[in-house]
């Protein structure tokens, strides 16, 4: 599976760069020719939209695969004036910048899913999903979304994350290798390997397994959460500067991690239990994001997809001098 790709958009050359990145990703995922062309058009139009309406911004390409159907989620992020009327902006022939006005209409037609979050004078995030072959059933109710990108200038991200659903539970790990670049990536990938080998164990036991595997690396900050939807509880264990929070009923509850470095020095690993609510979100992120976010600032955002929430938090709270990962998950909702 190819890594997530980030393209900074500041001029027309970056629009072309985003399109080329989309084609490479489609080919790596073995998209059929129609889907490859659709993805190229969607990315081009969204990158142009960022440039025209935001002045500058970023396009993220997130690859994945569900039920045998590969897909790419495109997040277009800007800090422009926002979209006054989303439904009007989606109509062919409408434009607020003197262009033909067909871009967002084309994105809507070529995407399996499309969503917007816009706020006056704070910008817009657009999420579009392009699927090769038959769309996966899981697209009807997205439960987990993420952003995971390296610091500018690096091709490998020192952060990593993984999740596993089984028997009414969801297990999630976020790892942040010390520093950035290949050595940090090696550390975080060892943590992910420990996660995959121990998915039937508790968060505490997974952290302990990762500690053994990471001794040959520079080490990492690691946190693991298990959401038990039947019992409505979250079990959480973390070492280092991974932030976790449960957001429900307009309130955010921070989860507890201890100081230390997995693979080297750490306090005794502990596991904590917190209440869960069926309408809650679990948000976990590396220190590439500031922890000063507050979802209450974003009216209506909690009704959007996890990917949209992850994209907004990344846009507004990323730190430019580190890799950045944010994972947002919720319980599946009825269609």
Image (cartoon, rainbow, N blue to C red):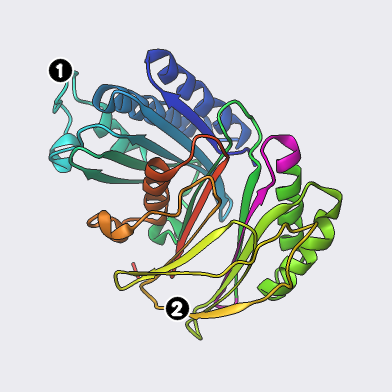
Neighbour tally class for label 1: few under 14, some 14-19, many 20 plus, Cα within 10 Å = few
In the rendered view, would you say 27 is above or below 319? Answer: above
Name the N-terminal-most of marks 2 and 1: 1
Image spot of residue 238 (x, y percent): 63, 66
In the rendered view, would you say 83 is above or below 165? Answer: above
Q: Is residue 112 visible?
A: no
Question: In screen coordinates, is 286 left or right of 183?
Answer: left
Question: In screen coordinates, is 256 left or right of 34?
Answer: right
Q: Quadrant of the C terminus?
A: bottom left
Q: Which residues are magenta?
A: 167-184
The image quadrant that residue 280 belongs to is bottom left
Name the secondary structure under disc 2.
loop
Question: Which residue is at 45% across, 54% downward?
Answer: 291
The residue furthest top is: 13
Q: In terms of depth relative to the viewer, which is nearer, 36 or 142?
A: 142
The image quadrant that residue 305 belongs to is bottom left
- The label on residue 276 is 2
- Is 78 in the magenta? no
Image spot of residue 67 (x, y percent): 56, 56
Image spot of residue 91 (x, y percent): 16, 34
- The label on residue 98 is 1
């Amino acid at each position: 599976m190819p890594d997530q790709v980030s393209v900074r958009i500041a001029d027309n050359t970056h629009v072309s760069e985003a399109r080329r990145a989309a084609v490479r990703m489609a080919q790596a995922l073995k998209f059929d020719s129609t889907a490859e062309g659709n993805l190229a058009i969607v990315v081009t139009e969204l990158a142009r939209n960022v440039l025209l309406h935001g002045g500058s911004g970023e396009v993220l390409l997130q690859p994945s695969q569900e039920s045998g159907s590969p897909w790419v989620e495109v997040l277009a992020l800007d800090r422009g004036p926002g979209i006054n009327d989303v439904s009007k902006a989606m109509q062919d022939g409408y434009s607020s910048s003197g262009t033909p006005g067909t871009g967002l209409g084309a994105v809507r037609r070529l995407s399996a899913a499309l969503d917007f979050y816009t706020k006056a004078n704070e910008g817009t995030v657009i999420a579009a999903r392009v699927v090769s072959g038959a769309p996966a059933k899981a697209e009807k109710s997205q439960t987990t979304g993420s952003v995971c990108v390296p610091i500018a200038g690096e091709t490998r991200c020192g952060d990593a994350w993984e999740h596993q659903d089984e028997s009414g539970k969801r297990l999630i790990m976020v790892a942040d290798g010390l520093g950035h670049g290949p050595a940090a990536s090696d550390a975080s990938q060892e943590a992910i390997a420990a996660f995959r080998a121990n998915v039937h164990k508790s968060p505490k036991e997974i952290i302990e397994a990762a500690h053994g595997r990471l001794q040959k690396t520079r080490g990492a900050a690691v946190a693991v959460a298990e959401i038990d939807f039947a019992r409505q509880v979250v079990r959480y264990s973390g070492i280092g500067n991974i932030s976790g929070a449960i957001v429900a009923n307009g309130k955010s509850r921070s989860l507890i991690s201890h100081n230390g470095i997995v693979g080297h020095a750490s306090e005794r690993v502990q596991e904590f239990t917190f209440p869960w609510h069926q309408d809650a979100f679990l948000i976990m992120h590396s220190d590439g994001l500031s922890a000063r976010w507050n979802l209450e600032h974003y009216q209506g955002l909690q009704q959007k997809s996890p990917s949209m929430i992850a994209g907004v938090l990344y846009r507004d709270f990323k730190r430019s001098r580190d890799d950045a990962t944010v994972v947002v998950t919720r319980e599946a909702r009825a269609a």
